[in-house]
Every structure is written in structure tokens, then in C-alpha cells.
Image: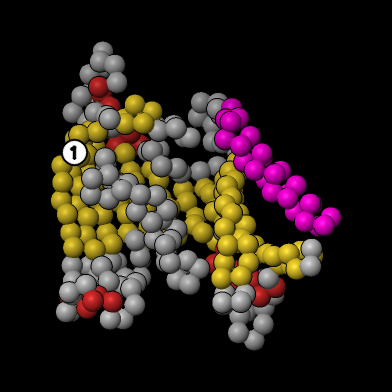
Amino acid sequence: MTKRLLFIVLLIVLFTGSLNAEEAAPAAPATGAEPGFTFAFGFALGYSAFSETETYQKLSLRPDFGFGKFGIGLAMDINYRFVDSELEVRSEDWVPDDEHSFFDLYLPMFRYIRYGKKHEPIFVKIGAVEDMTLGNGFIMNNYANTLFLPETRISGLEFDMDGALFGFPLLGFETVVGNLAALDVVGARFYVRPLVFIKDLPILPNLQIGVTYAMDQDPFMYVYDGWAATQGVADAGSAYADAFGIDLKLPILTEAPVTFAL
């Protein structure tokens, strides 16, 4: 009973700690200075079923360690249960054995590496893509390549660059690749700010006119064999999907944790 109580207290501490991290924004660094060490943290509760009789509750920890512009995201899933009031953590997730080496267990804990953050003049992220939206999201909205974890880990790429990086904020682009090995899902948006040099207008200089294109060269890559046939697709390997669009976007707030655009 004591261990159960201690574990519940730990969850409460983690929860309140994450709330405080959201509520207390760090002080802005001095102009021209790079931020030092930063830390962000998130977690989720769920359950895992490894067989019909082997089920665990799951605590998913998602820390992000920032060092200047660089950042590393980790994913640590703790599968646990209480047996006769005793806390039991699934050892197969942490202790190497004949089937799972040290690298098999611990390399997947690295979710991504990044340079910069979304909405900054340059942003590069390799690994997990969790909430990618191009433009207003009519073509690609909250795309993620993490839907098949933990069985299938996919490394993708996000690469955004704004002309403001070079003192020319008229142009910019944002891109995404869902799987760097297969190049199945690929999307890009190029935009122009036609009013950016008119300084007397409030907000309107941020107006973007964008062109978006996205494609999926193998929509049935991750489904079970034969499932595509049940959906009326005779040759899943030749299936293809793409979309093209033009949008207007007016960013109002671009600083985390709150963003807003029309």
C-alpha cells in the first residue's frame, strides 16, 4: 500500500511540475544572446497489453532538453502494475536479454534532434513528426509519423526556413518528409508576404500567400497484407495520392505556447 501511495504522489508531482513549466515562461534572453539550457516536459497515462493475460498501466515521459538552438527529445515509457499491492515495473523494457540488446532498448528512447523551434526563421527536426501542419491545414493537418509506435519507429524530417533569416522576410518555405528511408509522405509549402515592407500597417505585413503540395506515394505501406484488397484496391503497391492548394494565412500569435492565425 505504501508503494502504491508513493507512486501516486510521484504522478502528482510530475503533473504539477509540468503545469508550472507551462505557466511560468522563461525570461527572454538579451538581444543577440543565445538561450542557454532549457527544459520542457510532458507526460501521458495509458495502458499496454502484451498478451491477453499480460497487461500493464503505462506512464509515458516526454522530456525535451535544449542547449541553445539545439534540442533533444526523449521518449521513456514505464510499464507498471501492482501485484498484491507491490509495484512491479516490466523489466523487459529496461534489462537487455538474448532477444533485445542494450541498443535495441535504449536507442528508441531518442525521439528527435532539432535545431530551432517551429515559427523561428530556421527550424530543422529529424526523428518523430508529431503535429505537422502545412499552411492552414486544409491539405496536411496535424500529420504524425508516430502512430505505429512502439512496433514501428519511423524517422522523418521537418525543415522550415524564412527569408527573415537573411534580412529578406518576403519569402519562406516549410517542408516535411514522413519517412526518410521510404520518402512516402512528402509535403511542402512556399509562401510570400506581399505587404511585409509596408511598416505602417498593423498585423497585415504578416499576411502570407502560400502554395502547398503534398503526396503519399504508398498510402498502404503500413497496413496489414490484404487489407487494401478489402477496401477495393487491387494493386496497393501502385496506389498514389496527392493534393495541391493555395491559401491565405495571417499569423497573429507565433510565440509558444500559444499560436494563432487567421
Q: Which residues are magenta?
A: 1-27
The kind of residue tagged 1 is Asp
Residue 223: percent from left, percent from top? 33, 73
Identity of the residue furthest to the right in this view: 2
Q: Relative to 35, say whether 144 is above or below.
A: below
Residue at (61% x, 80% y) in the render: 100
**Which residue is at the far bottom?**
98
Query: Where is residue 38 shown, x and y percent of the image?
Result: 60, 41
Magenta stretch encompasses residue 70: no
Q: Secondary structure at mark 1?
A: strand
Residue 184, compared with residue 73, is above or below; it is: below
State whether residue 37 appears in this view: no
155 or 241, which lies in front?
241
Identify residue for label 1.
Answer: 247
Judging from the image, the colouring scheme is secondary structure
Q: Where's residue 189, x and y in %?
A: 24, 46
Residue drawn where x is 47% and y is 66% of the image: 149
Height in image: 19 above or below 103? above
Mark 1 surroundings: few (<14), some (14-19) or many (≥20) residues within 10 A: some
> Left or right of 35: which side holds 187?
left
Magenta span contains residue 9: yes
Considering every residue shown, the one lying at the far top of the view is 200
Image location (x, y in percent) of residue 171: 24, 37
Q: Residue at 58% of width from left, 43% of height from top?
A: 40
